[in-house]
Image: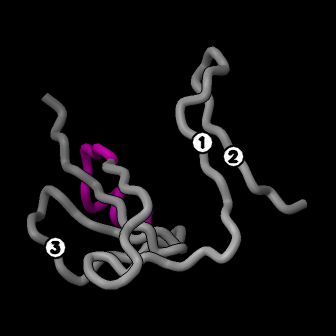
Amino acid sequence: EDITWLELLDEDGATRMGFQKIENYQRPTWPEGPIPQQLHLDFHVTEMEKARAELLAIGATQAEFQSAQNFQVFFDPEGHPFCLVLKPVL
């Protein structure tokens, strides 16, 4: 089956995020280049190293340049950048 649309729902069944597959997709050339990023998500984590290891294990790659230890940039397998942001538990 060729899935072209995916929705993430909350516990009440309301759509919280939707994803659509497009034809002729081109990987972004972030941070520079002719193809800009097409989305960006930040995920808050309480344990940066644990989250980093889990992401790498499922196919993410880490960007070469990192500006801070508490804010790390990664790429999903299709090349979209996203970040982990350390939010310590208070």
- Residue 31 image offset from top left, x and y in percent: 26, 76
Q: Which residue is mark 1?
A: 18
Q: Which residue is mark 3?
A: 66
- Residue 87 image offset from top left, x and y in percent: 18, 41
Q: Residues within 10 Å of mark 2 (few under 14, many from 20)?
A: few
Secondary structure under badge 1? Answer: strand
Q: Residue, x 35% and y 60% (percent of image)?
A: 82
Earlier in the chain: of badge 3 and badge 2, it is 2
Q: Is residue 19 magenta?
A: no
Q: Residue furthest front?
A: 34
- Report the Cα–Cα distance between label 3 and label 2: 31 Å
Q: Residue, x 60% and y 19% (percent of image)?
A: 11
Q: Between residues 3 and 32, which one lies in front from this camera angle?
A: 32
Amino acid marked by disc 3: Gln
**Could you tell whether 48 is left or right of 68 in the image?**
right
**Could you tell whether 22 is left or right of 49 in the image?**
right
Earlier in the chain: of badge 2 and badge 1, it is 2
- The quadrant in which the N terminus is found is bottom right
Segment colored magenta: 43-55
- Circle 3 or circle 2, nearest the eye: 2
Amino acid marked by disc 1: Gly
